[in-house]
Image (cartoon, rainbow, N blue to C red):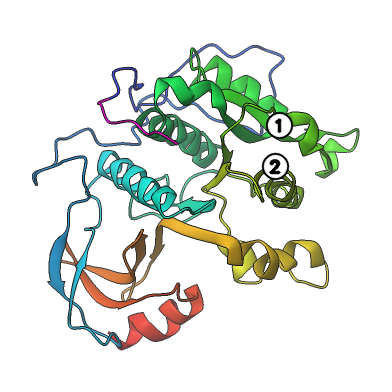
Amino acid sequence: MPLSRAPTASRLPIAIPSLPIPEDFNCRSFKMERGMNLCNRKIAEYKKSRKLDFVTHVVYGNSDDSVGIDVPFPNDYSELLEQAKEATELALKDNKQLMEIEFPTAGLESVPGDAEGGTEMTGSMQLIREFCDLFVIPEKATRTRIFFPEANEVKFARQSVFGGASFKLDYLTKPSFLEDFGFVSKVKMADRVKPEDEMFLVAYPYYNVNEMLVVEELYNEAVAKTTRKLIIFNGELDRIRSGYYPPFFYPKLAALATTLFPKMETVYYIHNFKGTRGGTLFRCYPGPWKVLRKVRGKYVCLHKQGVMPSLKEVALDILPSA
């Protein structure tokens, strides 16, 4: 898929817009807070380019190599989105078909839950628009379908963050008559996908357990054995990886860890660990997985490896022993 090579003139201001919302609109309690600034627009002190910037630093821990050449941790969301774009482009060149992008939206040092759920989703929506404006050239916008969890969120996106965009907006689930009890109806993916679609981006499919099951259906029916690509953006897939959903009660969801996830490449990832011995698990494709700690305002790499460590391993093993 051809990707952008020029600055995007149409990028929205990163502050969440305060737009009028219809009185009858209901969308998971999304909050559009005045003055909320997700991305710091300061110009980076180091030289920026369309190529990945690399730094050399000493690495401690169990790594066999003492020196690594890796992408630095971003200073702000502008750098993060640029890194994520470059990482995704490199993954596409390597014929990766199913990709994951995951990072916190309440601040680069935040963890899930630091912001109210609706605010985090709104932040992800804004950053998805930013990412798509960087990543997709205008000629490919109408062939890029962005799936939001529910139909109401598609309406919200069109009236706010994605207003005027050419991307195709769609949804994974629709409310049922038991919506007040958390029940929604799956949407048949064969009815949503169009022949001209080339790229799918799924936005934060974690609020309801059915959402990731529909993503698996989307991959199996519309991506596998085709030339299409699928990106899962801020899906909080660590909930499934870590066993947050007990397999006894959620067997289909738990099965994704062995059916869908092995086919997926995590192209960009940030997960923070709080506490006196806290740190950050960071990865930018095709680089290694790194465990970082901020020391005197700068990130120091404590450990790196070629495969993703579990969050439990990082929290209980790597960080305490660093």
The reply, left or right, for residue 7 in relation to residue 173 is left
Circle 2 — which element?
Answer: helix
Which amino acid is tagged 1? Val
Q: Nearer the viewer, residue 83 or 322?
A: 83
Above or below residue 58? Residue 186 is: above
Give yes or no for contact between labels 2 and 1 (Cβ–Cβ under 8 Å): yes
Q: Main secondary structure of the magenta part?
A: loop
**Alpha carbon of mark 2 to alpha carbon of mark 1: how far?**
7 Å
Which quadrant of the structure image shows residue 30? top right
According to the picture, the residue beneath numbered tag 1 turns out to be 193
Residue carrying label 2? 222
At x 64%, y 11%, the residue is 22
Q: Nearer the viewer, residue 143 or 183?
A: 143
Query: What amino acid type is highlighted by mark number 2?
Result: Ala
- Residue nearer the viewer, 137 or 281: 137
**Quarter occupied by the N terminus:** top left
Residue 6 located within the stretch drawn in magenta: yes
x, y percent for residue 186: 82, 41
As for residue 315 lying within the magenta part, the answer is no
Magenta range: 1-7
Query: Which structural element holds mark 1?
Result: loop
Tell me: residue 44, above or below residue 100.
above
Q: Is residue 95 left or right of residue 228?
A: left
